[in-house]
Image (cartoon, helix red, strand yellow):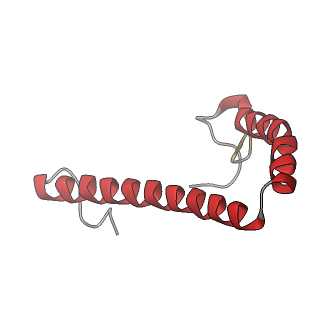
Amino acid sequence: MAAGHSQACGSACLGYVYLPAVLVTSLAAVAAAPLGATLSHRWPTLWLKRAFALLLAIVIADLALKLLQGASTIASGLRSGLLDPMECA
């Protein structure tokens, strides 16, 4: 992989940064910031800590599920002979 502009991305990228995703993420963050500030002042600290812990647990579970699905896909590809073991290393 060469550094610089990706050919698959076209003009919507700046290096490896996909500009439409930056725009959507920025707009969502700006729109949600007042809600976050309001909740942080209204909710007790314990509720905030538990809500954040729940969010982290959901993200970890999602990543673990994707990892396990990817591992099973690679294992089935190796078993069927579709993947070269040297390419997976």
- Left or right of 54? Residue 77 is left
- Left or right of 63? Residue 88 is left
Where does residue 5 sit, x and y in percent of width and height?
A: 70, 43
Where does residue 14 sit, x and y in percent of width and height?
A: 77, 42
Q: How many marks?
A: 0
Q: Quadrant of the C terminus?
A: bottom left
Residue drawn at 77 percent across, 66 percent down: 45
- Seen in the picture, residue 73 relative to 23 is either above or below; the reply is below
Q: Nearer the viewer, residue 56 or 45?
A: 45
- Seen in the picture, residue 7 relative to 40 is either above or below; the reply is above
Residue drawn at 56 percent across, 55 percent down: 1
Where does residue 65 sit, x and y in percent of width and height?
A: 37, 55
Q: Nearer the viewer, residue 48 or 29?
A: 48
- Seen in the picture, residue 18 relative to 10 is either above or below; the reply is below
Q: Nearer the viewer, residue 78 or 21?
A: 21
Q: Quadrant of residue 26?
A: top right
Where does residue 87 sit, x and y in percent of width and height?
A: 32, 62
- Left or right of 70? Residue 26 is right
- Seen in the picture, residue 82 relative to 89 is either above or below; the reply is above
Q: Nearer the viewer, residue 67 or 59?
A: 59
Residue drawn at 39 percent across, 53 percent down: 66
- Left or right of 17? Residue 83 is left
